[in-house]
Image: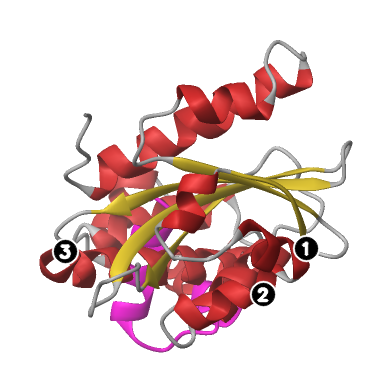
Amino acid sequence: MRKYTNEKEILEALERQAFILGKKLEQKDISIQEYSDALPHEITVVKHELERFAPTFFAERSLTMLDMSPEEYTKDALNIKRYVFPGDFERSVALIEGMGNKQETPVSYLQRIKLYGKETYEGIYSLSKKSLVNNELVSVYIPVRNFASSSNRLLRLLDESLFVKNNYWKFSLLTRREKEIITLLAVGFQNHEIADQLFISKSTVEQHRKNLKRKLGIRRFIDLIRFAQAFDLI
């Protein structure tokens, strides 16, 4: 059985599954039941109707792990909240709602779930993708093994995805030149060095820095670094 040992592998696996599933379902090459049956046992898939969040398909093995009956889940999908670490369910719902009408953009998130017979929570890394054509949400789930040792890294990754979501509108205000200056500042260039690098005056660099602080709503240099890291400028 394939083991996923780090965040990069988990995300890549989720993205592959979401992409393959979306294409196959759109082209009607495979039913969601056939797709689910072909997955490794530790990976599960669930489909919800968007408007009421009513489940229209779920792998029964996912409910077995929770000791929840299909009837109980079908009656009210929100019953699953009692198995989820406080706050995680609400946070994942907020991320999904934040997708808006971006049909092709999947969102990944982490939930901690207490499985049947377990005393501690286990991390479940998830990727959800909307299909506005079919008015449904398809989600793929992979348990994160050895969660206790990796939870801090995973939560930092989740926090970064939330940072991008909450600040993308600010980042979209930046010009190409301002993004270049963020990159150079973040890697340690001084104002006069940036001026030489970009063939502009030092006073122009200083004005760009003022504009960056205003547009991004920041005061500290460390906040500038956060934007550079979150939006892949360094």
Q: Amino acid at mark 3?
A: Ser
Instruction: Tell me if label 2 and label 1 are in contact, CB under 8 Å.
Output: yes
Look at 37% across and 43% down and name the residue there.
11
Label 3 vs label 1: CA separation?
30 Å
Helix, strand or loop at mark 2: helix
Q: Which residue ends up furthest to the left in the rendered image?
A: 149
Q: Amino acid at mark 2?
A: Leu
Label 2 vs label 3: CA separation?
27 Å
Residue 78's label in the rendered image is: 2
User: In which quadrant will I find the N terminus?
Assistant: top left
Q: Mark 3 or mark 1: which is in front?
A: 1
Res. 98 visible in picture: no
Instruction: Tell me if label 3 and label 1 are in contact, CB under 8 Å.
Output: no
**Residue 54: x %, y % from top left:** 79, 60
Residue 232 in the magenta stretch? The answer is yes
Look at 66% across and 29% down and name the residue there.
32
Front residue of 178/49: it is 49
Residue 150's label in the rendered image is: 3
Front residue of 180/111: it is 111
User: Would you say 230 lies left or right of 146 here?
Assistant: right
Look at 64% across and 71% down and name the residue there.
93
Look at 30% across and 45% down and name the residue there.
197
Earlier in the chain: of badge 2 and badge 3, it is 2
Label 2 vs label 1: CA separation?
9 Å
Helix, strand or loop at mark 1: loop
Task: Find disc 1 in the rendering and name its residue.
Answer: 53
User: Would you say 35 lies left or right of 98 here?
Assistant: left
Magenta residues, as a range? 210-234
